[in-house]
Structure formats: structure tokens, C-alpha cells
Image (spheres, helix red, strand yellow):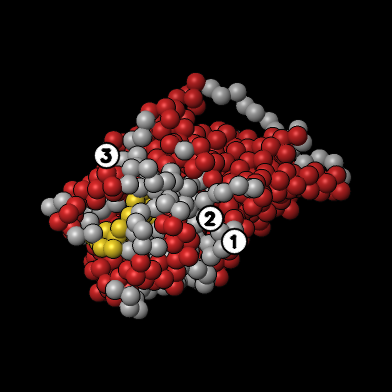
Amino acid sequence: MTLTAEVRTGRGERIAVGAVLVVAAVAWSWALGDRTLQPYYAAAVHSMSQSVSAFFFAGFDPAGVVTVDKPPLAFWTQTLGVAVFGFHPWAIALVQAVEGVAAVFVLHRVVRRWAGPSTALLAAGLFALTPVTAAVNRDNLPDTLLVLLLLLAAYCVTRAVAAPRWLLWAGVFVGLGFLTKMLAAWIVLPGLALAYFVAAPGSRGGRLARLAAAGAVTLVVSLSWPVVMSLWPGVRPFVGSTTDGSVWQLAFGYNGLTRLVGGGFGATVGTALGGGPGPLRLFDSEVGGQIAWLLPLALGSLAVAACRARGAVPSAKAGWALWGGWLVVGVAVFSFTGGIFHPYYTAELAPAIAALAAAGLVTAWRWHRSAGAGRFALPAAVAGTAALAYVLLARTPDWLPWLRYTVLALGLLAVVAALMRASRVAVVTGLAAIVAGPAAFVVETASRPVSVLESADPGAGPSSAAAVSTVVAVNTGAAAEAGYIRFMDSAYRLGTGQREVLAYAVAQAPSTAITLAVEGGTYGADPFLLNTEARVAPLGGYLGFDPAPSATELQTWVSAGKLRFVLLPRVFLEMGHAGAASGAASGVPGDAVELTRRIGWEAKHCRPVPPTRIGPDAATAGLLFDCAGLA
């Protein structure tokens, strides 16, 4: 094993790699035109395609009220797809699929430099068949681009062993990862640094100096956009999911400590997903089916390699250090984080799991062909992985009930064949037992329709909507659950009543900077932004709890003629907000102080428009306030 020696790629290997890439492309682009994406980010991309300001600031709405809760890089790439093909969900999904396939190819190249063609091909295949990878690559979340950028950083580290300038490029790619999903990108830094340190030539001081330079590059690139945001001299959108509009609070608060230790601002939807923190979280009922299939195999391979590290050459140690550091740090973070956690976050672990599992299997196969005690490693690996697959599949007993027994049978056959030295049978049946479960999850993910509710928290395999609904109920109250789920799930549909309300606002106030403002956050504004190019703005950011704007700022907008009409969606009345609309205290859950102040101000200073004046179906959209001349 070496990080520097490249073996010429033969025709058979090229065909095999191409086949893996084709399988990945089909799995992630199947039914591209029927894709349901996270509407929050899709609406933002539509706005970014219309406004240079929204594009640069990652603005959610073309009026420039609020940004999304992530940095802009992933949405910049999606906006480029929209610029080429026009605004269609499939244009965004195509960008995601291309980035996902590129990640498989880069993983193959990284592992090939470390462990050779066989391990690289197996790693690429295992990565393509990881359920959570399929889930995020079929959605529009930033995680797809994040994984690609981190793999490019890993490739640069392997090249830096022979040419140190590549280490600076690794820093660039990790920094770009920060501009994709902030602190999540820095999880891989220990593994990358350790890999270079153990494999690069030269003195210890020289290696540390080069790592420090690469770290400085990482920091500069990571903080470039936040610094510009914080020093921007003119008007810019309020930074969503913060209390003060600070991009630093977004980076190190909402997307930092809040994720790790809990607490923070706004709604807590997401904190109950993935189960409670602990060493077995990645194996629980919410997360296990997404990522855990090969996790014990990867960790076991790493442990064996660590025990045998004393006699290994530096280049071999570097590969284990790279993927081992990536995996161990990632597992620790995602297992014990006490704040907002979604199972799809574990997509970041998939490359390391695939690489380590593939290396472990190839090593076990080589030992199996020897006469020593190591020949039992292969049957043990297959048996343990098949047993775990049975457990994971048994959690959905009504979905393909025969599959878990088939996996056990294949695993048993592989073990017997290995012990009897029937090598070909052992390889074929062993691989089938290992990949059958996750492959079935991937196929299910590609073939079944996904609701808007599921797209907000994508998962592979059998539908995860029930888990999301449970979390919504916990955080909004059981009485409000049904109405709020309908509210979220209708994000792509602009109903007749909503069209009537928008047409009325346009006719009455055609020159206002904001044609219509919608309470309830982005889910209330999504239907308008996804289906029209009107200057519709959310009040309150993602879920309505941001002070964007405050009640005082709202009054300023109305006084300046920037805004006239505010829509209070019908679901808000169904959820108990009628009291706020009449000036009384509201029962809004979560940190909703500014939300209740805004609604109270609207009720006090603005005039409800009779639905009959708007259109026959206007009442289905909610309650429209006309604030003209009443501020």
C-alpha cells in the first residue's frame, strides 16, 4: 500500500468504475422530474436566481428580508443549474446528482492511491450503496456538496505527500466546505492533518509548519464570506435563525454550539430526531438504517490496523489515519451532540465508512488465502455484518419481510464456503449478504415518492414521515400537529385562495417594495416564491420565530410605504393564534416573543380585508391585513 505510487488504470478497471458511477447516477437521478425537494432551500434558490443581492447573501426572498440558515456555496451551485435550465426542481436535483457521482469518483481516486485498485473499487461501490448518501443526493441539502469538497481535500492531502503545495489546496477545499455547511466541514481536519504528518517526508518541524500554513488557508477561506457579511456597509438581509442578525451567531451559535450542546433560539424541531445522545445513537431506530450497516466493520478494520501499526510503512499508516480520524471524530460528534441533530447529518461519515470497510474486507480476503489464524477474519466480518443487517431490517417487519432471512442465509452460506475454502462462493455470497440490505434501502429511496415533510428531513428506505410528524407534535403540541403538517406539506402548492390574495395585493399596491408579507416564516411564503416571481417575503425567518422584522421595523416598513399587505395563514388561526390576531396573548410554542408582537401590532394597526372583497376562495388562504395609512 502506498500513497504515491500510481498503477496505470486498465480497461477492465475503467469499465468497473464506470459501472459503479452509472449505478450511482441512476439511483440519484431516477424520476428526476418528479422530485420533491426541501421547499425552504428550493424557494431560496429561485430567489437567488432573480436577485444578485439574494444570490450573494444567500437570501431567502427576492425582497431581501432574511437569509437562509446556511452559508451560500451549495445554493450558488444549484442556482447555476437553474440559470442554465430554468427554475425547475429537476434542475436543482440534477446538480445534486452530478455532485454525488463526482464524490464517488473522487473517493475511488483517493482510496486507490492508498490501497490499490481492488480496495478503491469496492469502496466506491459501498459508498454508492450507502442509504443516507442516496437520501441526501436525492434532496437539495448542502450535505452533497460538503461531502464532495471534503473528499477533494482528502485527495489533495494524498498528493501533498509528494508535492507539498497540494496541502494548501486541501485547506482551500475544507474552507469551501465551511462555506457550504460551516463547522461540519472542520470535523475532518484531525484526520487530514494526521495523515499528512505520518506520511510526509522531512523533519517534524517542517511538517508542522506546512500544516500550520494549510490551517491558515482553511481559516481564511472559511471566514471570507462571514467577514464580508459582517463588514458589509450597506443594507443586507437579516441573517436567518439568529437573534441579532449576526453571521457569527449563525456560524458558531445556531450551526455550532446549539447543535452540539442544545439550547439556543427559536423552534426546536429537529432536536428529537435521531434519538437521544449516547454511544449507540448511530445504531438506533432512526439512524441505524441510514448509516450503521458497515459501521462495525469499518471500526473493527480500523482497530485491527491500529494494533498492527507498529510494523506498517508510513504511507499505509497515512491512509488509516486519514479515514480513521475522519470516522472517529465524526462518530463522536454525531453520537454525543445534544442539540439539533438529524439522521442525514451522518452522510458525512459515509466516505470514511466505505473506505475502511473496503480496506478491511480486502485485507481479510488476503488473510483468508493464507494458512494462518487470519483466515477466520473474513467469515467473522461477513457473519457480523449480516447479523447487523438482520437487526436493522427487522425494525420494519412489514417491508420486504423475506429480505432479512435471505441476508442471514447468504451470510451463513458465505461463512461455510469460506471455512471450506470455496473462495469464489465465499466472495459472491459474502458480498451479497453485506450489500443486500443497504442496496434495498437505496432502491426503495429511488423508487418511492417523497412528501414535502420528508424532504425537510430526508431518510432512506421505508418512509420516515411518521418520525418527523412525531417531532412536530412534540414541539408544537398534539392539537396543532395536523394543521401544521398540512401547512408544511402544501409548500409547493399555490392554492386558488392564495392566488386571489396575491392578485388583490398586486392590484391594490403594485409599486410597494414588498408585494405581500406572510407570517409563519418560510413555509407560509414558499408557495408564492416557488410558483411566482412576486416580491413576497416571510416574516420571522424559517419558522416565524426570528426577529426579522421586529414589530418596530414592521411599523417602519408600513410608514415608509415599503409594505401594505400582511397575510396571516389559516393554519395560524387553527393553531391558536386567533388570540394574537385580536390583541390577546398567544399560545405560540417556542421562542415566539417577536412573532406575537408582530401579530399583535398587525391586529391593532392594520385592517382585516373581508374575504368577499378579495375572491370566492380567499378565506382558505387565511386572514389578510391591509396596513395602508394605519401605522
Residue type at tag 1: Gln
Q: Which residue occupies the foreground of this view, 266 or 420?
A: 266
For the point 56% across and 63% down, the residue is 244
Say whether disc 2 or disc 1 marks the residue closer to the N-terminus. 2
Q: Quadrant of residue 612?
A: bottom left
Q: Does 419 sit above or below residue 242?
A: above
Say whether disc 1 or disc 3 marks the residue closer to the N-terminus. 3
Task: Assign the C terminus to one quadrant of the image.
Answer: bottom left
Residue 208 placement (x, y as % from top left): 81, 49
CA–CA distance in space, label 2 to label 1: 9 Å
Residue 316 placement (x, y as % from top left): 68, 44
* Disc sitting over residue 239 in the figure: 2
Q: Which residue occupies the foreground of this view, 175 or 344?
A: 175
* Residue 470 as seen in the image, left or right of residue 350: left
Mark 3 = which residue? Answer: 34
CA–CA distance in space, label 1 to label 3: 37 Å
Task: Assign the N terminus to one quadrant of the image.
Answer: top right
What is the tally of numbered marks visible in this picture? 3
Say whether disc 2 or disc 3 marks the residue closer to the N-terminus. 3
For the point 68% across and 30% down, the residue is 5
* Residue at disc 2, secondary structure: loop
Q: Does 335 sit above or below residue 423?
A: below
Mark 1 = which residue? Answer: 249
* Residue 138 as seen in the image, left or right of residue 103: left
Residue type at tag 2: Val
Q: Is residue 20 visible?
A: no
